[in-house]
Amino acid sequence: MIPAPFEYFAPATIDEALGLLREHSDAKVLAGGQSLMPALRLRLAAPDTIVDLGKIDELRGVRDDGDVLVIGAMTPHSVVQASPAVNEHARLISLATATVGDPQIRHRGTFGGSLAHADPAADLPAVAVALDASFVIAGTQGRRTVSAADFFQGVFSTALGEDELLVEVRVPKYTGWGAHYEKFNRVAQAWSIVSVAAAVRLDGDSIAEARVALGNMGSTPVRATAVEEALVGRPATADAVREAAARAADGTSPVTDLNGDADYRRHLATVLTRRAVLAAAGTA
Amino acid sequence: MTTTEDRPATEIGNPRRRKEDARLITGRTRWTDNIVLPGMQHIAMVRSPFAHARITSIDTEAARASTGVVAVITGADIADEQGALPNAWAVVSDQQAPVHPSMAVDHVAFAGEIVAMVVARTAAEANDAAELVDVDYEELAPALELRAAARDEVIAHPDLGTNVSAVWAYDSAESGTGGDVEAAIAAARDGGIVIEREFRQQRLIPAFMEPRAIVVDPTTEQMTVWSSTQVPHFVKIFIALVLGIPEHKIRVIAPDVGGGFGGKLQFTPEEVLTVIAARRTGKPCKYCETRSESFMAAHHGRDQWQQVTLAANADGTVTGLKVELTADMGAYLGLVTSAIPLLGAFMYNGIYKFPSYHLGITNVFTNKTWTDAYRGAGRPEATYAIERVMDELAVRVGVDPLEIRERNWIKHEEFPFSTVSGLQYDSGNYEAATAKARDLFRYDDLRKEQAERRESGDPVQLGIGISTYTEMCGLAPSRWLGSMGYVGGGWEHAAVRMLPTGKVEVVTGTSPHGQGHETAWSQLVADRLGVAFEDVEVLHGDTQVAVRGLDTYGSRSLAVGGMAVLAAADKVIEKAKPIAAQLLEANADDLEFSAGRYGVRGTDAGLTLAELAFAVFQGHKLDGSAEGCLDADATLDPDDFSFPHGTHLCAVEVDTETGLSTIRSYVSVDDVGVVVNPLIVEGQVHGGLAQGIAQALYEEAVHDDSGTLISGSFDQYLLPGAPDLPRFETARTETPATTNQLGVKGVGEAGTIASTPAVVNAIVDALRPLGVTDVTMPCTPYRVWKAIQEGEQS
């Protein structure tokens, strides 16, 4: 279908973009368009104004900033996926990004666009939560930083104000950690039914630190703190991990849809968490 | 004499790449939506969001005032003009059916039914204005669940008073083709085996790649209609019959068409309405549906419940099969909606020779999109039912499922064989296909691995699924169609024209939409006339060019249309003979046609068809004793169906922790008779397998309690892509059909028909030790997981 009419802007700078967002109350930000374009074409969204961030160079790229990696919000998935720095210091992001859509989507879609869209079934939000990433938000009043746990507030809902932009994501370095992204879906190019993002640091044979987060187990990504706590200090064996992973679904309230009911998703969460943690430990 | 050494041995059997591929793959071709005409206007449809409602008012004022709008048309505006859409197949004489308007006037019977249309200067303006059409509805209770609808709990069309459209039955005792099935079941209950099962054939959406599109130009002497259709000849006749436009004032063109799978075997509301819009405004009009509209409003497929009772002796010899079928028509009867269950009626006995059979069919209306042909159309459902219960029978008898099939199938020396459903199978060799499949699959090794996994309690279990299928192709002998209540015929037509420069134009009445007729028919004619493949052009799909034809569906094109092409080519050869005799000053009896040339036996004298075509073009030397034209037309009505068959073996790994089924290997051995182009056959098998596997694992049209289609996009209606499918191992055996001159059978639907039960049989086979005896399609991880939970509890 054809989108409803809208006014289109393609600013060259962040400040220019913020100015446009302030001027136009019913504006949507176009950050790759892999979710927004279908919504526009189906007329599920019909904003008066589109602010396309595609021409803002300062929003693109991955850079090393000491203890953290900084990923520009408009960095395409394909660039994140190919980044040696991301692969070395935040391998979980590389692995999860490789499962986003298909190559065409990964060339158009962006890291920040996916996060700001906050689809509960998306891949990157759970990864950002697992890795304790920080979200740098620019507004007309200046910049503020929000933790991943606080950024995601609900289905398609984030800490971003109407005239704010996500400009970059700061990810602490997890150099030497093992990582695995376990995505469960019915066909390769579909949203996950449940996904698990896991990163572990081993000390000898035992788990020294663990980061585990679940995707699509609620309206926002869920940090599996019970699992993390149960893993620390335990050997990375099948039995120990199984025991810890059994707590993966604690406190979650996943949806029921055509792909399964809440019980099934809770069951999947435990199975997939076990697999994700064991696989992550295997690469550490 | 000229020798044939310069040419490939034969074109038939040559795996040529398809002529049409470059333009189809790049899309730089004549898709209907690519057609742009001067002054062309665009149409947007307004569709009912409700499954069942009365229209209380329609306010079009805002839409009419919208930028670029030329006209806004409601059902009331055209109530006297639009006629009723046809159903061409009354399966019983007292068949019940509601009037089927192209645009609803005061009552809508499914979500997606058209209630108004906007004609505007641009597609965007038409879309914008369509949103401004304000329709008031009074919602009515929808009839949704098929079995409840069959009990008339809620009536889909209150004026009709019932949801039951037709009740039809075939009984072997009554028809004299076998014994009494009730007696067989009664006997089996006493010391034999009776298996009773209920299977769900879920509703599917054809999901062709190119959505339907129509362009109508009313300014030409013959009104020109381009439509993305499988059946341009049907469309022409039905425009005449439904709208009262004289048939000779209509030209229909199916340009390149991006898939159909039966979904474009239809005469559609959108075609009627685009003609009306063009006629009313006097300007060309285009309608191109969105994918969402295609999901909602293009006809759906399958949607049946099958109650199956199989009777057998204790040794596993089948003695009878009884099937009670409830089929969802949806809201209306489309072109052949009513006959889809009937087209499967003769296939429930499959490749087996049991002595008694009964099939009862109840056709039922609901408030859903109407159903109609979808790849296989009745035969996949039948094949699924018999192949699923044969596996269950093997379990009851305690033998390998291949063994139980062999005990019951028709032996190759028993052909021709009259079946219990009244067909005559001309040929087949089930032993050969099965032996080959078994080898390629490494059947015994996989059974061994399966046993080991069961033994070790591996969370990933292995299942082996079998499907030994046959089907009926070459739709169809006209006499048979007439006897079954279909209003049309089943013949096909072709013309072969020798051009003055020796090139050849072949005109076919079939209408390819991805099948590769241009390539395959060129191969047929190149061999028959002894001309180069490159010198043959195949024309189709335009009623000004292909004047006669019955189009493409039911795996009929080669077995019927291809044979018409050969018949026309043979006539060309015959017509050339007296002319050659005259020009060579020889006795016609001394002439011999070989490799494209008439030669005088025992001499070097001769003339090629190209030389004869030029001589005819000049006419200088003809004495008038023979018609000065080599061109020929031929109409061919098949004597009987053809019956492809094969053995498909599928290995599925089922992750018992998540319920995920993954196909590990798939072997198909198909016997489609003589093969004209092995590459095209391979492509048909691959695509067919993907589509049949998709029914087993992925696809299902799902509605909510109000009748809204939930699976209305590719997000929810899953199609497998290349990453989701295994590497297919395909092979063939070749038992020529005896029902046509080349021995071909048909391959368009075989893969789809065979593969669905192979996959589900494999999943059930994997999980049988866990107490699972069936999984409802599509076998989603959730459903499989639940089946495991329930199996463990029982």
Image: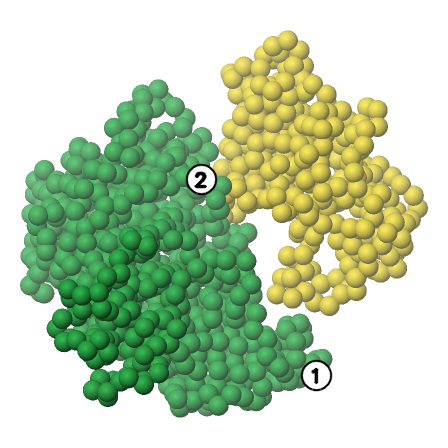
Circle on res. A166: none
Determine which residue is flagged by label 2: B781
Subunit of mark 2?
A: B
On screen, residue B675 versus residue B186, left or right, reads: right
User: Viewer-proximal residue, B705 or B603?
Assistant: B603
Q: Earlier in the sequence, mark 1 or mark 2?
A: 1
User: Viewer-proximal residue, B372 or B165?
Assistant: B372
On screen, residue B770 versus residue A157, left or right, reads: left
| Residue A180 visible in rendering | yes
Subunit of mark 1?
A: B
Q: Quadrant of the C terminus of chain A?
A: top right
Instruction: Indicate the amino acid at tag 2.
Output: Pro
Circle on res. B65: 1
Element type at marker 1? helix
Q: Identify the chain drawn in green.
A: B
Q: Quadrant of the N terminus of chain A?
A: bottom right
